[in-house]
Image (cartoon, grey):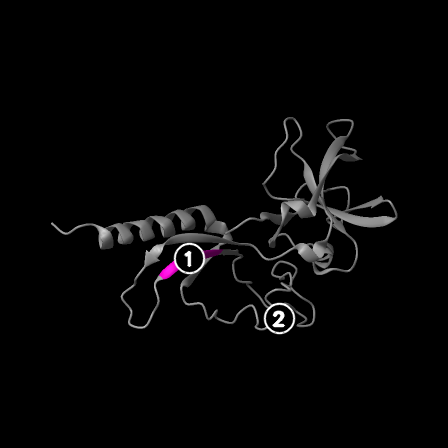
Amino acid sequence: MNNQISFRLSHAFLAENKNKYGTYHEKGKDYLFVAFYGGFMFKNQPFLCLLVPDDNSALAGLIKLGATRDFFTTFPTNLQFKPDFREIKADDRPFIIYHGLLIKDDIGTNDYNHELEIEPLDLGIEGLPKITHLVFEFTDDPPKKKAEDDNQPDPNHSKIPNPEKNGNRSNNQTPKNLNTLKTTLIVGGIVAGLILVIAAFLYFWKRKNSPKK
């Protein structure tokens, strides 16, 4: 089941640095800090940033490229809260205070998905096992144009390597476990799409299992 926290990179309000990220130094280590969408709110203090080790990791590379649409996840135990870690000047006030969530080990990050366990569902297809899990993967709209240089990743459509997935098969290979149904939703319609998928599923499941009059 899903037991990780999800984040989506953003740089909407980090005007301090034209490179779309800030820098932070603590105890001999360098960090990048970047905004992210949703997840945490504080009274009278809406700004919370991610602090990522500047160690040439895949996640640090995405931040430097200016990626803003990438989802990733990590376990809560891989995070450390840093209250009031940074003060930044603002036009309409003396300064803005940022809280931070420090990622201790960026190897512990992963692509985002959510797994839902359901009652066994038989689709009536011969040879197909009953479906027991739905996996919702949240992705971006397909890129409108190919990156100019194939060797340079498109910053808006980069993937964070998953060590667990890269062991025996590629990320795009169909899983052998057929009782897992994989559903891809577009970020722009996550809420509506998820509601429609669940509503349709419940409707047909109820019809299938309701006693006939």
Contact (CB < 8 A) between labels 1 and 2? Answer: no
Q: Horizontal and vertical percent for residue 166?
A: 62, 69
For the point 68% across and 71% down, the residue is: 149
Q: Position of residue 14 (x, y in %)?
A: 72, 42
| Front residue of 8 and 131 | 131
From what the image shows, is residue 189 above or below residue 46? below
Determine the residue positioned at 66% across, 43% down. Answer: 12
* Residue 92 picture quarter: top right
Badge 1 marks a residue whose secondary structure is strand
Question: From mark 1 to mark 2, how far is it between C-alphas?
Answer: 23 Å
Camera sees residue 11: no
- Which of 196/168 is in front? 168
Q: Is residue 32 visible?
A: yes
Give the total of numbered labels: 2
Badge 2 is on which residue? Answer: 167
Residue 47 is marked as none
Residue type of the residue flagged with mark 2: Gly
- Dominant secondary structure (helix, strand or loop) of the stretch shown in magenta: strand
Residue drawn at (84%, 45%), measured in percent from left and top?
Answer: 25
Q: Which residues are magenta?
A: 131-136
Residue carrying label 1: 133
Q: Position of residue 209 (x, y in %)?
A: 23, 53
Dot 1: within a 10 Å radius of its alpha carbon, few (fewer than 14), some, or many (20 or more) residues? Answer: some
